[in-house]
Image (spheres, helix red, strand yellow):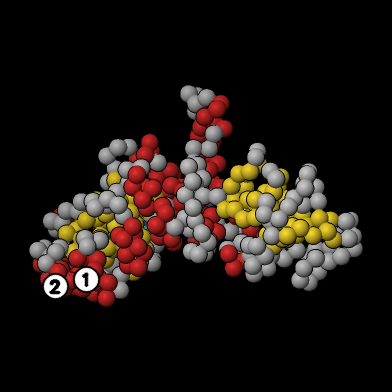
């Protein structure tokens, strides 16, 4: 990502959704060690977690979504910046600044076509008035917007319109004498697909965890490399994004099932021959979707083995009949990651289950123990 954005652009690591399932407290210090000093969350409670686990005092945290009234003062006090998209929040920011004696650091979010949150064009002038009048209490850290799906070419026209709208609105604000520190609009897919959206700062989520925003973006990147005369074969076949997360469990039990039996709830899986099954103590309550019933795979002894029957709340069964050697209780089961020469990626996972990478990752429950390994 750094090679795409250059050295002068601020890289903001997006760690909402519990750092896309990786764990805020696990990911943030690692990212700091890699030189990242700017993080974005969605809500004040996530900002508090990020704030409490940062190692570096200069690490900055930005809230892109909800800051409850009760949290604004905390944010201002701790120099946590936040989006403003209405005058109500602007006024609350000013009041919090008066109380705490610190300037509120704000990002003016512009409505450019997403229609979720952001100042509409006709709301802009009153907001500008308020900001200018309260110059002593507000620091405009950024002017920003978010695109409607930069990962898919089907949104091309809407995104091009958003880009022009953003520049048009920004010019208007600039003319009125407001000078932000950063213009920022780009998420992972925008950085990759629309370089003109990079501006002063980018907000990168999914790609920093080693996942493509979607298959289309992966294919586009791959095709650009293949078509490039100076890229060698090794570079062509190497995925530039490296997955960080692995998800592992162990064999809970091993069971022989004779031919002609249905396995588990209902009758979705029928043994046509004598089978050996292994129970794995992971179910849909842990984020392993029920839609992976009879569809998903896991790795056991380096072999891809199918999930058989329905995924239950806390357990699933896999067929290990064809795994060479003996599988025993306690053997490692890989749900995402590598084992010997095989690997299961969330991408293949999400194609199987029609999930987006985003959804699968952020559904990993917070109480699954997470360990950092080299
Ligand atoms: C989630 C989010 C991002 C990051 O998106 P990715 O596709 O994960 O890179 C950037 N900006 C905003 C406003 C977001 O909500």
Tell me the distance, in whole angstroms, between the alpha carbons under discs 1 and 2.
8 Å
Residue 215 in picture, x, y percent from top left: 56, 47
Which quadrant of the figure has residue 81? Answer: bottom left
Q: Residue at x 49, y 56 (%)?
A: 370
Q: Residue at x 32, y 64 (%)?
A: 48
Query: How many numbered circles does the render carry?
Result: 2
Q: Is residue 83 above or below residue 197?
A: below
Q: Nearer the viewer, residue 366 or 228?
A: 366
Residue 367 in picture, x, y percent from top left: 50, 64
* Quarter holding ligand 1: bottom left
Q: Residue at x 73, y 52 (%)?
A: 328
Visible residue check, residue 268: yes
Classify mark 2: residues with Cα within 10 Å, few (<14), some (14-19) or many (20+): few
Is the CB of the residue bearing disc 2 within 8 angstroms of ligand 1? no
Residue 324 in picture, x, y percent from top left: 78, 43
Q: Is residue 195 above or below residue 333?
A: above
Visible residue check, residue 173: no
Q: Nearer the viewer, residue 142 or 296?
A: 296
SS for callout 2: helix
Classify mark 1: residues with Cα within 10 Å, few (<14), some (14-19) or many (20+): many
Please name the residue that numbered disc 2 is placed on.
99
Q: Is residue 216 left or right of residue 17?
A: right
Q: Nearer the viewer, residue 8 or 366?
A: 366
Q: Which sits earlier in the primary sequence, circle 1 or circle 2?
A: 1
Residue 15 in picture, x, y percent from top left: 39, 56
Residue ranking furthest to the front = 329
Please name the residue that numbered disc 1 is placed on.
73
Cβ atoms under marks 1 and 2 closer than 8 Å:
yes
Q: Residue at x 47, y 55 (%)?
A: 22
SS for callout 1: helix
């Amino acid at each position: 990502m750094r090679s795409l954005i250059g050295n002068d652009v601020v890289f903001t690591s997006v760690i909402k959704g519990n750092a896309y399932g990786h764990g805020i407290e696990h990911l943030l210090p690692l990212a700091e060690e890699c030189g990242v000093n700017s993080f974005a969350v969605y809500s004040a409670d996530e900002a508090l977690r990020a704030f409490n686990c940062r190692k570096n005092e200069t690490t900055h945290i930005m809230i892109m979504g909800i800051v409850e009234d009760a949290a604004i003062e905390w944010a201002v006090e701790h120099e946590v910046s936040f989006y403003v998209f209405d005058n109500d929040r602007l006024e609350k920011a000013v009041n919090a600044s008066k109380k705490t004696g610190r300037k509120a650091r704000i990002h003016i979010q512009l409505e450019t076509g997403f229609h979720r949150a952001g100042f509409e064009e006709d709301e802009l002038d009153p907001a500008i008035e308020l900001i200018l009048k309260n110059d002593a209490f507000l620091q405009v850290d950024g002017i920003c917007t978010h695109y409607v799906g930069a990962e898919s070419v089907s949104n091309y026209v809407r995104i091009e319109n958003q880009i022009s709208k953003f520049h048009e609105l920004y010019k208007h604000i600039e003319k009125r004498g407001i000078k932000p520190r950063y213009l920022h609009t780009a998420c992972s897919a925008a950085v990759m697909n629309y370089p003109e959206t990079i501006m002063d700062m980018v907000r990168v989520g999914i790609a920093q965890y080693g996942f493509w925003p979607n298959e289309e973006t992966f294919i586009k990147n791959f095709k650009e490399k293949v078509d490039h005369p100076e890229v060698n074969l090794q570079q062509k076949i190497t995925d530039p994004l490296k997955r960080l997360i692995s998800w592992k469990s162990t064999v809970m039990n091993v069971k022989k099932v004779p031919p002609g039996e249905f396995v588990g709830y209902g009758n979705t899986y029928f043994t046509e021959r004598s089978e050996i099954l292994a129970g794995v103590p992971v179910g849909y309550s842990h984020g392993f979707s029920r839609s992976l019933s009879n569809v998903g795979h896991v790795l056991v002894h380096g072999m891809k083995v199918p999930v058989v029957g329905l995924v239950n709340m806390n357990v699933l069964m896999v067929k290990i009949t064809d795994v060479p050697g003996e599988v025993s209780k306690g053997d490692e089961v890989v749900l995402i990651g590598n084992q010997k020469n095989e690997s299961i990626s969330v991408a293949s996972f999400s194609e199987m289950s029609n999930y987006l990478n985003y959804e699968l990752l952020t559904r990993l429950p917070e109480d699954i123990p997470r360990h950092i390994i080299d």
